[in-house]
Amino acid sequence: MTDAVLVTAANKRIGKEIAKVLSQAGFYIYLHHHDSAAEASQALGEFEADGECVQCDLGDYGEVEKMIAVLAEGSHTLKHVVNNASLFSVDQAVDFTEKSFADHMNINLRGPMQLTRGLYRMLGDNDRGSVVNILDSKVFSLNADFYSYTLSKFGLYGATEMMAQAFSPKVRVNGIAPGLTLISKTQSMKNFSLANHLNFVGAPLKVGDIASTVLHIIKTTSINGAVIPVDGGQKMMNFTKDVVDVASGILNKN
């Protein structure tokens, strides 16, 4: 039977491209969405291999546990998880709220931890699977912007290595740390066009490169406990502000 992959938030943006590439590689896709059933169904229809949509609020501990139970009894054996879903909201060290902090930690850190543990529990002793956590290149070069978001990703960065130790050899756990790849809701096209060149390759990052790296990690069984930057070397630029704000500063001077 074809092995299955769960890709969270696979109804759009980077998650959709990851699911598409994995589908092309022959995996059965469990396409997760939060509350976008029509969009998820449309995305699934564009893939080459079979799959099905699964709905879950990853910020709700109980809902995540229920989804894990459903997947354990699914039509195809779940072998891999791509923790792509992410909350990305603005707050700062001086103004974060209890809700903002909790929401980021629940969705970006606790949810992936639950899904990784769930995969470990559902696999047999002789089964082998993997998890790929989608992080952010900011974890290699911290700045104080997007405070709760960055802390949640930094936590997942640490958890990736910890879980790789805890769940081996049954489940390999790795991560990918992308740089700025797609335009955000509040970003102008002018800002994006500059920001996506602020790296050492001097060119926009490709979402397909993230997806192909996910596939490479899944297929390469000797990779474990690694976090691979897919950021054009942006982490080496050591920005003291988020790259969007760096671009804004450059534009404001011109």
Image (tube, grey):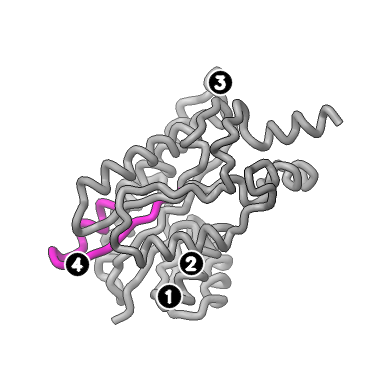
Question: How much space separates mark 4 and mark 2, taking CA atoms?
Answer: 22 Å
Numbered circle sitting on residue 127: 4
Could you tell me which secondary element the residue under label 2 belongs to? Answer: helix
Q: In front: 94, or 57? A: 94
Horizontal relation, residue 175 to residue 166: left or right: right
Farthest-out residue, top: 94
> With respect to residue 229, does 238 lie above or below?
above
Residues in magenta? 116-134
Residue 95 % position (x, y): 56, 20
Mark positioned earlier in the residue sequence (3 or 1): 1
Crowd class of label 1 (few under 14; some 14 to 19; many from 20; radius 10 Å):
many
Amino acid beneath label 2: Ala
Residue 91 % position (x, y): 57, 28
Question: How much space separates mark 3 and mark 1, taking CA atoms?
Answer: 42 Å
To which quarter of the image does residue 28 belong? bottom left
> With respect to residue 26, does 16 lie above or below?
above
